[in-house]
Amino acid sequence: MTGVHTASRTRNSARTKIVWGVLGLGMMLSVAALSVLDPQSPSARGGGVALSPLMSVEGSRGVDAIFQTQAELKNDHWDSIVIVHSGSNKGSSASIEAEHQASGYDGLGFHFLVGNGTGMGNGEIHVGQRWLDQRDGADLAGTTAGVNPRGMIEVCIVGDGNRKAFSDEQLRRLAQLVAALSQKFDIPSDKIFLHKDIAG
C-alpha cells in the first residue's frame, strides 16, 4: 500500500512542478508582451519596440513579432542583411539613436539592435522605427561598389567585437533574428554580410 501512495505522490509532485512552471512562464510572457505594448515602457522609448529575451522561450516564434510592422511589409524590397557592431561596450536604443541624430540622421539608423546587458537586456532585440515604417536603414559608411544599401536590413549588435567577445545570449538571439529574416524574405546566405565584408 505504501508503494501505491509513493507512486501517486511522485506523479502529483511532477505534475505540480509542470503546472507551476507553465504558470510562471505564462506570467513572464504576459509581462513581456505588456511591456512591449506599453509606449511608456523604457524599452519602447527611442522610436521602436523591444523584444525581451523571454519572448524567444519557444524558439523563433517570439522573434516572428518583428513582422508585425506599422507599414505593410515590403516583401520584394529586402534582399540582404548586414550585421554591424556598435563599437562601444554599452548602448541602448535611446543612446544609439541620440548618436545617430547628432550625426544628422533622422533617428536610429539601424533596423534592429541586439543588446548585451549594458544599456539593454542581454539578448534583447530592439525593433527600430525604420523597420516598423519599412524604410531603408541609414547609409552605411564605406560600403564597397556593387553593394546596394537599399533593400539591406541593418542589424547592430551592441558591443565591440574587436575587443571583447559577444555574449552567448546575444549570438543566439542574433542567429534567431537573422534566420527569421532570411527565411521570411528568402535571403540567401551569400547576401548576409558582416559590415567589414562590405566596407571599402
Image (cartoon, grey):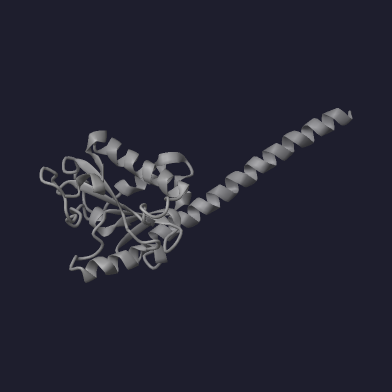
Front residue of 172 and 8: 172
Q: How many callouts does the rendering have?
A: 0
Percent position (x, y) of residue 77?
16, 43
Q: Residue at x 24, y 38 (%)?
A: 185
Taking the image as shown, residue 141 lies to the left or right of residue 112, namely left
Percent position (x, y) of residue 161?
37, 52
Q: Residue at x 37, y 63 (%)?
A: 91
Percent position (x, y) of residue 78?
19, 43
Front residue of 81 and 129: 81
Outermost front residue: 163
Taking the image as shown, residue 147 lies to the left or right of residue 25, namely left
Q: In this orientation, does residue 59 appear?
A: yes
**Occupied quadrant, residue 126:** bottom left
Q: In this orientation, does residue 46 appear?
A: no
Front residue of 161 and 60: 161
Q: Residue at x 40, y 40 (%)?
A: 60
Above or below, 46 relative to 192: below
Outermost left residue: 145
Percent position (x, y) of residue 160?
36, 56
Q: Residue at x 23, y 57 (%)?
A: 130
